[in-house]
Amino acid sequence: MSVDIGEAAALLGRTETRAADAHPEPAQLLRATLDRDIGSFEPGSPLPLLWHWLYFPPLIQQSRLGEDGHTRDSSLLPVVPLLPRRRWAGSRLRSPAPLRIGDRLTRRSEVTSLTPKIGRSGRLLFVTIRHTLAGSAGGSVVEEQDVVLREAAGRSTPPGNPAAPAPCDFEHVVTPTPTLLFRFSALTFNAHRIHYDHPYATQVEHYEGLVVHGPLIAVLMLDLVDRISPGAAVSAFEFKAVNPAFVPHPLAVRAKTTETGFSLRVESAGRIASTGTATAPRHNKTTIAT
């Protein structure tokens, strides 16, 4: 069984440039969504890594959304009729200097690879997009984002193997709820119905429940790093989605210190949902901030 990417191959090398202002309100709203003290984001305050996602939501007209809530066409993501479903598979980021609240942000995006594969759920197409961001105060972020396109779900995907026991130095447990998923969807302008439409998620895409956003799980990993070392600048981060996580199974966000920062993982219902590594200053704290 092969994957014919057809006209999608023409998107390789395509670019898009956007600009946005890093206003404090979206950052405050995400802080509230994470159940943290809202505090203040004054002009010039560092923008936590990953939070640039708040400022570049998909600019898609309602009439261009497909049945699943995603766009049917995009200037960057290819349209492959046999692979109508999509999910965020992971990202690799580096940030020599943080973006800051009040910055004028510029983002240049480029499709850098299209890789067909065969997986447990059938035919797949991995699309890698490199986002290069620059802030007016001198900060920068380079993110390589992997998105996977897959076949329509005719059956549920077999669950992954149970998570093997692994030691950790810090843990924070978050119980996902429909309201948490709704708020994160609203902040990122994500209309994918698997995150808020239970009948669609279970009856059409054959998941066991509402699906927790992969990007939300990534944000929770770096939120744990911030709870361990408040305000520490994360200069590099990578994460990989392993298994879907569902409402209402608790998310056990775990961190183990390393020579360069933290090794991270999130477990849900006995399986690994996501793994990650963060480069950040090490602290010797034994408790985490709430």
Image (cartoon, rainbow, N blue to C red):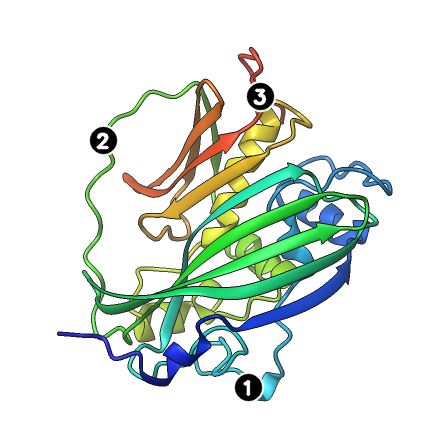
How far is mark 1 from mark 2, CA to CA? 43 Å
The image quadrant of residue 224 is top right
The residue under label 2 is 164
Residue extending farthest to the right is 43
Q: What amino acid does circle 1 point to? A: Arg
Q: Say whether disc 1 or disc 3 marks the residue closer to the N-terminus.
A: 1
* Labels 1, 3: front one: 1
Q: Neighbour class for label 2 at 10 Å: few (<14), some, many (≥20)? A: few
In this rendering, which labeled residue sits more in front, label 1 or label 2?
Answer: 1
Residue at 52% across, 79% down: 74
**Quarter of the view holding residue 228:** top right
Confirm or deny contact between disc 1 and disc 2 (CB under 8 A): no
171 sits to left or right of 267: right
Q: Disc 1 marks which residue? A: 64
Amino acid under disc 2: Ala
Mark 2: which secondary structure? loop
Question: Mark 1 or mark 2, which has the lower sequence index?
Answer: 1
Q: Where is mark 3, residue-wise? A: 288
CB of mark 1 within 8 Å of CB of mark 3?
no
Q: Position of residue 160 (x, y in %)?
A: 22, 48
